[in-house]
Amino acid sequence: MTTARGMAPGRTRVCPHCRQTILESAAICPVCRHHLRAGDRPTAGRDVEGERFSPLRVEGTIEQAGGEAGWEYSVLLTVRDARGEVVSRQVMGVGGLAPHDRRTFVLEVEVAVPAGPALPGAAPA
């Protein structure tokens, strides 16, 4: 990844379409999937796309088995660092389930390995 203009891994910005916080290097918003014009990106004119993959994907379903009362749910996401300390904890969504209703949830972590020169001090691949 290039470090021009202070570019560093993990820097963020706001998607001009959906207003969600995304990575500065993104050419496509992972939330709304809009393609970002080169002029929309602080990284315009630099090859930062590189390789993308998902090292973690978990899918699960909950189903309200029946009965008279519905359920309420909160989808929480907690991110911890290598020491186990909480980096971020957010409510990603809330909702309700009527009897015999179901919801499927997918957690996917997308990783980008931007093209360009390695960061100073980074180990070679």
Image (cartoon, grey):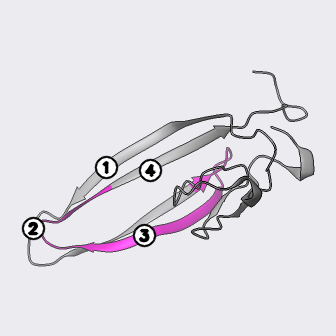
Which of the marked residues, 4 or 3, is nearer the chain's N terminus?
3
Q: Out of 88 and 39, give the one closest to the viewer.
A: 39
Instruction: Please provide percent x and percent y for residue 37.
Output: 68, 55
Tell whether position 5 is magenta: no
**Residue 116 point in image, percent of width and height:** 81, 33
Q: Who is closer to the viewer here, 30 or 95?
A: 30
Q: Amino acid at mark 4?
A: Leu
Of labels 2 and 4, the one closer to you: 4
Quadrant assignment for the C terminus: top right
**Amino acid marked by disc 3:** Gly
**Earlier residue among tags 2 and 3:** 2
**Sequence-wise first label, 4 or 1:** 1
- Residue highlighted by disc 3: 93
Amino acid type, residue under disc 1 in the picture = Gly
Overall secondary structure of the magenta section: strand
The residue drawn where x is 63% and y is 49% is: 84
Give the Cα separation between the discs numbered 2 and 1. 19 Å
Asked if residue 88 lies in the magenta stretch, the reply is yes
Give residue 66's mark.
Answer: 2
Q: CA distance from mark 2 to mark 3?
A: 23 Å
Determine the secondary structure under disc 3.
Answer: strand
First along the sequence among labels 1 and 3 = 1
User: Where is mark 4, residue-wise?
Assistant: 107
Give residue 110's quadrant in the image: top right
The crowding category of the residue bearing disc 3, from other C-alpha atoms within 10 Å (few below 14, some 14 to 19, many at least 20), is few
Question: Magenta region: which residues?
Answer: 79-104
Q: Amino acid at mark 2?
A: Gly
Residue beneath label 1, please? Answer: 60
